[in-house]
């Protein structure tokens, strides 16, 4: 709990899920989509996130978001993306510059657990995005070699035990970023 609380902006507190404070590393490939009517290029993404409560509802706070070059235009929309050499394939996730290597084998169908509809990130204050997902065929997965998770260590986390892995070959989602609230100042003479 303490290491999670250390990375959260003021006003956010870690939330336990199934009795444990969790940090998750999510990796995926974006293979199409549109933003504001414009096509999104293909890219890979790796993010580190943790569960919090926001306005009385469960949310994920994105601690770090790394993308390949095709995902960098997300910064123009205010997303806190940074570049990384990253490869996400079925059965493997590799981010050599970040010290991440996961090789896994998909297992039996399973339920994904808590999937929140709210994502939060820091950008001149806490920003919220709404996530709408379609159904996905989730499966458990198991490591085929020891995981390398140096990126989590670099962010101040100290993973214990074996990671719990979930896998789906395909998922679809939509993101909605609410507009920033504008402040108005009046000049009184």
Image (tube, helix red, strand yellow):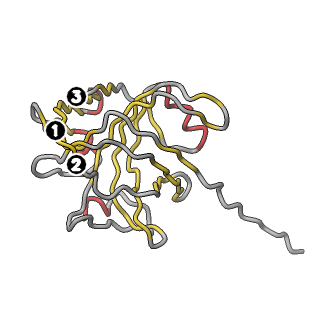
Cα distance between the residues tagged 3 and 2: 17 Å
Mark identifier at residue 110? 2
59 with respect to 165 (left or right): right
Cα distance between the residues tagged 1 and 3: 11 Å
Q: Would you place residue 13 above or below residue 165 in this image?
A: below
Location of the C terminus (image quadrant) = bottom right
Location of the N terminus (image quadrant) = bottom left
The residue singled out by tag 3 in the image is 91
Name which residue lies at 21% across and 39% down: 150
Mark identifier at residue 107? 1
Name which residue lies at 59% across and 34% down: 34
Q: Would you place residue 87 above or below residue 14 in this image?
A: above
When asked about the image quadrant of residue 109, the answer is top left
Dot 1 or dot 3: first in sequence order is 3
When asked about the image quadrant of residue 20, the answer is bottom left
The image position of residue 68, as x and y in percent, is 43, 27
Dot 3 or dot 2: first in sequence order is 3
Q: Secondary structure at mark 2?
A: loop
Q: Secondary structure at mark 3?
A: loop
Q: Residues within 10 Å of mark 3 (few under 14, many from 20)?
A: some
Name which residue lies at 29% across and 25% down: 89
Q: Residues within 10 Å of mark 1 (few under 14, many from 20)?
A: some
Depth check, front residue: 103 or 82: 103
157 with respect to 115 (left or right): left
Q: Mark 1 vs mark 3: give the one in front.
A: 1
Q: Would you place residue 62 above or below residue 182 in this image?
A: above
Name which residue lies at 51% across and 28% down: 32
Q: Secondary structure at mark 1?
A: strand
25 with respect to 65 (left or right): left
Cα distance between the residues tagged 1 and 2: 9 Å
Are the residues tagged 1 and 3 within 8 Å (C-beta)? no
Q: Would you place residue 6 above or below residue 87 in this image?
A: below
């Amino acid at each position: 709990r303490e290491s999670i609380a250390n990375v959260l902006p003021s006003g956010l507190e870690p939330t336990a899920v199934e009795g444990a404070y969790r940090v998750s590393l999510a990796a995926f490939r974006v293979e199409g989509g549109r933003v504001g009517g414009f096509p999104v290029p293909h890219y890979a993404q790796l993010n580190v996130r943790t569960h919090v409560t926001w306005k009385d509802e469960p949310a994920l706070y994105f601690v770090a978001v790394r993308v390949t070059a095709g995902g960098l235009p997300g910064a123009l929309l205010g997303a806190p993306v940074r570049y990384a050499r990253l490869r996400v394939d079925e059965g493997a996730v590799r981010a050599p510059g970040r010290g991440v290597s996961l090789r896994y084998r998909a297992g039996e169908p399973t339920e994904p657990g808590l999937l929140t509809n709210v994502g939060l990130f820091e950008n001149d204050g806490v920003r919220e995005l709404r996530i709408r997902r379609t159904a996905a065929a989730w499966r458990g997965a198991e490591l085929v070699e020891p995981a390398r998770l140096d990126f989590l260590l670099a962010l101040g986390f100290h993973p214990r035990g074996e990671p719990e892995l979930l896998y789906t070959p395909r998922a679809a989602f939509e993101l909605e970023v609410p507009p920033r609230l504008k402040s108005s100042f009046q000049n009184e003479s």
